[in-house]
Amino acid sequence: GKHLSVKTAARTLGAWINFGAQHLCGTQAERAVKATETAQRVGYLPNPPIVKRTIHAATSMMQGLYGIQVTALGAQKISSWSTAALHLWWGAGRKMRAKELCWGLFAKPHKEEPFQAIEMRRIGGLRRRLQMHPELHEQHVRDWTATLGPSSGAPPRKHEDGPLHLVAWEVQRLGWQWDDPWWYELPNGNVLPVAGGPNAWWQHVVREELRRRDLRELLKRRPHLGGIENGLATDLLLSLFRWKGTKEHPALTPYERGILQAVLADGIMTQHRR
């Protein structure tokens, strides 16, 4: 019968973390600023990168993602948030790294990187709503027809408030076509159901499409990385990085792992960069 008190903050390993700040306070832009500040604080924790990313996903990401399915957020604020999220576990050094490779190889960007997490939350939010409320299917078709219509031949989608408008914006950024209220057409010609199919398979397809889109953007900046637009064989690329070691072949030292990490993220000085 004893009432438990609710703690809004605590000191953890010397860092003061406010994990009880209400996510619904303020506008979407104000929540993004708060999420950026939280990510910067998490970066001061004396923990390994994987622990910092876990804390970041449970604090900063939840603050900034609240209400993102229905409210547009400026790209500059998301970019500042994304930079803070990368710095908290990668560090502010080794600046020649490609952020897309850092996230794609060593982290879970659909949960920890703001741009991808927002896209996943918006597209996945529409799917969950239609799965949980079959009675809204007819209304979904009417709303889609009235507000959007087929994307082929239509003017570019605008980044404006509203769940359907924001999903259409993210679909456009991914290079998909949305010509039917129940199907997306992917760049490779395959189709992805809006609400159908197994959830695990659906999430895997969306994650891979997010990664490929980012890699295509990276290729525009770094043409010498030709071929990455088709995806990354992470198990092969990270086999040495993840090697646990044996008596004959010990694991890499932390220093060696750091060098290998920089190499894999295209973050080293080479002849063509001089």
Image (cartoon, helix red, strand yellow):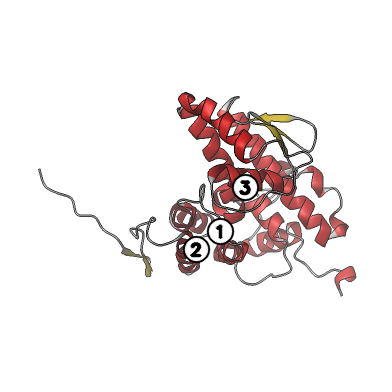
Q: Relative to residue 229, is residue 85 drawn left or right?
A: left
Check disc 1 and report its element: helix, strand or loop. loop
Tell me which residue sits at (58%, 29%) in the image: 141
Horizontal side, residue 113 vs residue 13: left or right: right
Residue at position x 54%, y 37% in the image = 126
Mark 3 or mark 2, earlier in chain: 2
When asked about the image quadrant of residue 95, the answer is bottom right
Relative height, residue 112 to residue 177 (above, below)? below
- Frontmost of labels 3 and 2 is 2
- Mark 1 or mark 3: whose residue is earlier in sequence: 1
Q: Amino acid at mark 1?
A: Leu
Q: Is residue 103 above or below residue 209?
A: below
Q: Quadrant of the C terminus?
A: bottom right
For badge 2, the amino acid type reads Ala
**Residue 161 disc label:** none
The numbered dot on residue 244 is 3
The residue lying toward the viewer, choosing from 245 and 135, is 135
